[in-house]
Image: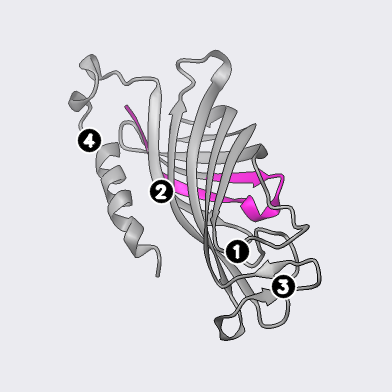
């Protein structure tokens, strides 16, 4: 299970989220900033970053990894708006018969066994609203900065996804005095970059 290496980060975030208010700003006030840590889960786990069909015997899978988030919260910007920036890490693994490179046709794609690391940095303008005192929902849009590094270059004529427009939707449940459990879904213009962020956030 790949969840286990992320448990220390989640536990630290939970401890910070429930820290006494006296450890924050004087008078119990909090800054209009929040930070979060959790995990990123790609929703297109069976597709390739190159968005092409795989030849027989070739397996392409995606795996989630660490997720970080920082946001300027609505009590700084009027109208319930906030600005959020995330760092989403995931990995694509390509397996081929006998561990050898497979060429899908005269012009590619080329499948090279090994891993690729995908890093996304979505920056979004969001609007949210509260339902009662403990639940918030919202969404927004922005730009997703994408970097892909690894062994599988996709072959001639294959367009790899780059940076582009992204939209998101999220919900938050209050934990303690200033922490939340957050679930956010990112929708990118390239389906292989869609996924869920699940984590804990806290006001600074």
Identified at 47% across, 42% down, the residue is 87
Q: Which mark is residue 54?
A: 3
Identified at 34% across, 64% down, the residue is 4
Marks 2 and 4: which is nearer the front?
2
Q: Which mark is residue 152?
A: 1
Q: Are marks 1 and 2 in contact (CB under 8 Å)?
A: no
Any magenta on residue 189? yes
Marks 3 and 1: which is nearer the front?
1
Mark 4 neighbour density, 10 Å: few (under 14) some (14–19) many (20 or more): some
Badge 4 or badge 3: first in the primary sequence: 4
Q: Which residues are magenta?
A: 184-204
As measured in the structure, the alpha-carbon distance from the residue carrying label 4 to the one carrying label 1 is: 44 Å
Q: Most prominent secondary structure in the magenta stretch?
A: strand
As measured in the structure, the alpha-carbon distance from the residue carrying label 2 to the one carrying label 3 is: 31 Å
Where is residue 154, by image quadrant?
A: bottom right
Marks 4 and 1: which is nearer the front?
1
Mark 4 lies on residue: 19
As measured in the structure, the alpha-carbon distance from the residue carrying label 2 to the one carrying label 4 is: 18 Å
């Amino acid at each position: 299970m790949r969840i286990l290496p992320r448990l220390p980060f989640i536990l630290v975030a939970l401890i910070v989220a429930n820290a006494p208010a006296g450890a924050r700003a004087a008078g119990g006030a909090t800054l209009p900033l929040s930070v979060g840590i959790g995990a990123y889960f790609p929703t297109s786990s069976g597709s390739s970053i190159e968005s092409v069909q795989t030849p027989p015997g070739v397996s392409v899978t995606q795996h989630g990894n660490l997720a970080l988030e920082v946001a300027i919260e609505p009590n700084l910007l009027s109208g319930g708006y906030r600005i959020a920036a995330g760092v989403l890490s995931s990995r694509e693994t390509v397996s081929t018969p006998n561990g050898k490179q497979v060429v899908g046709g005269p012009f590619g794609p080329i499948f090279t066994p090994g891993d690729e690391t995908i890093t996304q940095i979505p920056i979004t303008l969001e609007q949210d609203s509260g339902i009662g005192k403990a639940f918030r929902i919202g969404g927004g849009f922005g730009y997703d900065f994408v970097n892909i590094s690894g062994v599988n270059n996709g072959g001639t004529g294959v367009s790899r996804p780059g940076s582009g427009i992204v939209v998101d939707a999220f919900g938050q449940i209050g934990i303690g005095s200033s922490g939340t459990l957050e679930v956010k879904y990112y929708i990118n213009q390239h389906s292989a970059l869609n996924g869920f962020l699940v984590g804990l956030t806290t006001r600074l």
